[in-house]
Image: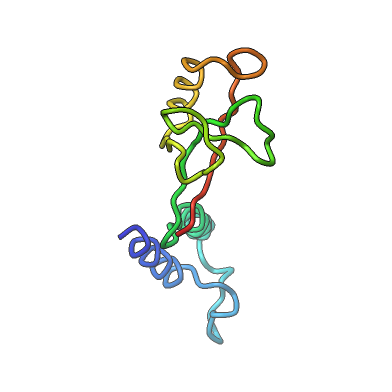
Amino acid sequence: MANDLIEEARRVAMRICPIPSQVEDGDSIERMPDDLLQACSVISRLCDAVEVRDGEETGWVIEHGRSQPSHPEYWAATGFDHDNLKAIRFARKEDAERVANALGGGWPEGYHRIADHMWCR
């Protein structure tokens, strides 16, 4: 559903604010009001920023403070594991930070890393 809305917003933006290569002879992009051009730019950037790709999931994870960043151990509720598919996924960074602070036992003492992570199916 999100992808459908994004595509609809792109189609609307292109109708009201075409890119120069799509401007027909006799039309001029320079004649469009500045605020309309700015609105089209914002819509385009917003669509790019929130695009949801099929099969992708993102979230925040807790990485053990003693594990190497190149091969992290993720918190999996019952302990830490190198398998990122077992990692507990948080929608908000602040929730991951609160849990990490409660866990303790990192290195230095009580320190764990919070990382944004993407899983692809």
Q: Which residue is depicted at the point 45% across and 52% down?
A: 50
Name the residue furthest bottom: 25
Vertical placement of residue 32 versus 115, above or below: below
Left or right of 69 on screen, residue 5: left
Screen quadrant of the C terminus: bottom left
| Residue that sits furthest to the top in the current view | 109
Name the residue: 57% across, 35% down. Answer: 115
Front in this rendered view, residue 24 or 48 = 48
Residue 33: image location, x then y, percent: 50, 60
Q: Position of residue 100 (x, y in %)?
A: 50, 21
Please tell me which residue is depicted at 42% across the width and 60% down the height of the picture.
55
x, y (%) of residue 94?
Answer: 46, 25
**Depth check: 6 or 115 in front?**
115
* Most foreground residue, 57 or 102: 102
Furthest residue toward left? 1
At x 41%, y 29%, the residue is: 77
